[in-house]
Structures are given as C-alpha cells and as structure tokens.
Image: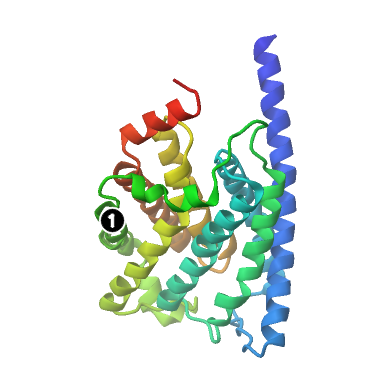
C-alpha cells in the first residue's frame, strides 16, 4: 500500500508540474510577442528570419521547449530560501542570461541573423514574464526561512578566497568549451564549412570563438551564482545535478527542441557537447564555490543537524 501511495503522489506531482510547465511555456510565448512589439515601438530594427526557418513550425517548438525548462527552473528555485520577489529577480537573471543572452552570443559565431542584436532588448520581456509566473507557481514550503536582500548580496564575502575561486570558475569555461568542441567538431565541422548544406551555419575564426567564451563563461557563472551561494541542503551531488540541469535545459533548448532545420548529424553531437559542458561546469562551480564546511554550517542553521 505504501508503494502504491508513493506512486500515486509521484504521478500527481508530475501531472501538476506538467500543467505548471504548460502555463510557463504559454506565458513565455506571450512575452516574446510583447517584446517584439515593444522593440518595434521604440524603433529597433526587426530581426530578419532566414528563409530556411518557418515560424509556423518554430513557434509550437518554442512552446514545447518551454515546458521542461519551466519545470526545471521552478523545482530548483523553489528549494531556495527566497521571498517571492527575490525568486523573481534571481529567476529573471538566470533565465535571461542563460537562455537568451548566452545563446545570442553563441549565434553570432555560428548562425548570425540580420538585426539579431534587437533580441538583446526584446528577450528581456519573455524572461521577465517567465520569472514572474515560475515564482508564483512554485512556492517554497510553508515555514521556509527567507534571506534578506543584504544577506543574499553579501553571501560571497563569507567564503574564504571567494575572488580567486570565482575567477578560476569563470576562466575554466573557455578550455572546457574548446576541448569538448574539438571532439564534437570531428562529426559536425563539415556542415559549417560546406555552404551547399544551406543550413545557415558558419565557422568563425578560432580566436573569435575562444574570445567570445570569456564573457559567456562569466554569464554562465553569474546566472547560477544565487543557487550556488544559497543552496539550503547538505548534498553536494544534488546541487551539482540541479546546477547542471539548470544550465543544460537553457543552453541546449534550441538544439534539442527548436532547431528543426538542422539534421540529426548536427543536433545529436551538439546535444552531447552541451550536456558535457553543463555538468562539467556545474561540478567545478560546486567544488570551487561551495566548500563542504559551508554546507555543514547551512545545515546547522536550518536545523538539519
């Protein structure tokens, strides 16, 4: 009976999360439309969609991809000791940086689109709409002790050597990106170099690719830093998995769900590449910025020891 009861709770929770994910995905699409309208109103040039992309096909894929992303972000940020508005702000930062800005910078290297820079502004709106709804739908458990804004902003100062740890965690990303990308390029490079494939892919010079990973590495770290510094549990493996999932579901969404015009020979290797990038990054972040001693202190503070 206990097994049946547990299974019923899991099924019920999964169903509720799916419904919440659908709501988040729908609101995200509305935010995209609103952002595009406002960008036009303020006079920003409209991004030109290439001929090989059919927006009628793309929008349903954007909606579908928003469901797992909403669930992962909701379940992760629900665990943090944040008030509603703290979750809104940190979710906005995380979603905008990882899902929108980091992917825009990547697209400049491999799939540039005319007037793509407009998205840097317009994508603020779907990120904001997403953050507002996720923070509303996934609330912390009753009785969860929330942190003050000043406490959240000063968390890094309590960690010995935070500055050098942060810099190492940041600068580890370019070599990770290069080494894993070098392996994946054995399978995908021809699609970037041969224009006859007509996929809109280009291969930037190596120096430009590596240079771009310096700001992207900083963005990744900033996007998940509130999670790293405020994780309430004591299990570093759980934190590693959550950080990895938060990064992966956002940076890989376009390859996994949206880029339907790319052949499997491109999408599958890049999906494995982004998976490896995400979880290697997450592991280094936890090792460098969340020492075991810090988690023991947190357990004592929230009454777990």
Q: Locate residue 172, reporting x and y percent.
A: 27, 57
| Rendered image quadrant of residue 96 | bottom right
- Is residue 189 in view from this perspective? no
Q: Number of callouts in the render?
A: 1
Image height of 48 relative to 15, above or below: below
- Left or right: 187 with respect to 106? left
Taking depth in this image into account, of 6 and 122 the one nearest to the observer is: 122
Callout 1 environment at 10 Å: few (<14), some (14 to 19), or many (20+)?
A: few
Quadrant holding the C terminus: top left
What residue sits right under mark 1 in the picture? Answer: 163
Taking depth in this image into account, of 31 and 229 the one nearest to the observer is: 229
- Left or right: 214 with respect to 31? left
Residue that protrudes farthest toward the top in the picture: 1
Image height of 67 relative to 204, above or below: above
Taking depth in this image into account, of 272 and 45 the one nearest to the observer is: 45
**Residue at (67, 41) in percent of width and height:** 139
- Left or right: 158 with respect to 129? left
| Rendered image quadrant of residue 202 | bottom left
**Residue at (29, 46) in percent of width and height:** 288
Q: Is mark 1 on a helix, strand or loop?
A: helix
Q: Locate residue 166, reporting x and y percent.
A: 31, 55
Q: Locate residue 83, reporting x and y percent.
A: 62, 46
Tell me how the rendering is colored: rainbow
**Residue at (34, 68) in percent of width and height:** 213
Quadrant holding the N terminus: top right
Q: Locate residue 198, reporting x and y percent.
A: 49, 79
- Left or right: 228 with respect to 184? right
């Amino acid at each position: 009976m206990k097994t049946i009861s547990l299974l019923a709770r899991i099924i019920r929770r999964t169903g509720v999360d799916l419904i919440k994910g659908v709501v988040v995905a729908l609101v995200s699409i509305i935010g995209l439309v609103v952002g595009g309208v406002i960008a036009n109103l303020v006079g920003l040039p409209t991004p030109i969609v290439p001929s090989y992309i059919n927006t009628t096909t793309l929008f349903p894929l954007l909606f579908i991809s928003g469901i797992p992303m909403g669930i992962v972000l909701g379940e992760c940020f629900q665990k943090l000791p944040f008030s509603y508005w703290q979750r809104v702000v940190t979710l906005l930062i995380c979603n905008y940086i990882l899902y929108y800005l980091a992917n825009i910078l990547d697209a400049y290297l491999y799939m540039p689109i005319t007037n793509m820079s407009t998205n840097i502004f317009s994508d603020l709106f779907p990120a904001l709409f997403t953050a507002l709804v996720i923070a509303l739908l996934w609330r912390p458990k009753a009785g969860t002790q929330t942190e003050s804004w000043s406490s959240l902003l000063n968390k890094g100062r309590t960690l010995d050597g935070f500055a050098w740890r942060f810099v190492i965690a940041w600068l580890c990303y370019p070599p990770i990106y290069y080494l894993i990308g070098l392996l994946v390029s054995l399978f995908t490079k021809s699609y970037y170099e041969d224009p006859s494939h007509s996929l809109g892919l280009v291969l930037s010079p190596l120096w430009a690719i590596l240079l771009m990973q310096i700001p992207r590495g900083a963005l990744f770290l900033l996007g998940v830093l509130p999670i790293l510094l405020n994780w309430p549990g004591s299990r570093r493996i759980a934190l590693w998995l959550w950080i990895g999932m938060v990064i992966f579901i956002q940076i890989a969404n376009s390859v996994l769900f949206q880029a339907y015009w790319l052949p499997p020979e491109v999408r599958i290797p890049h999906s494995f590449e982004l998976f490896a990038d995400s979880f290697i990054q997450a592991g280094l972040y936890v090792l460098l910025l969340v020492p075991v001693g810090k988690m023991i202190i947190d357990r004592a503070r929230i009454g777990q020891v």
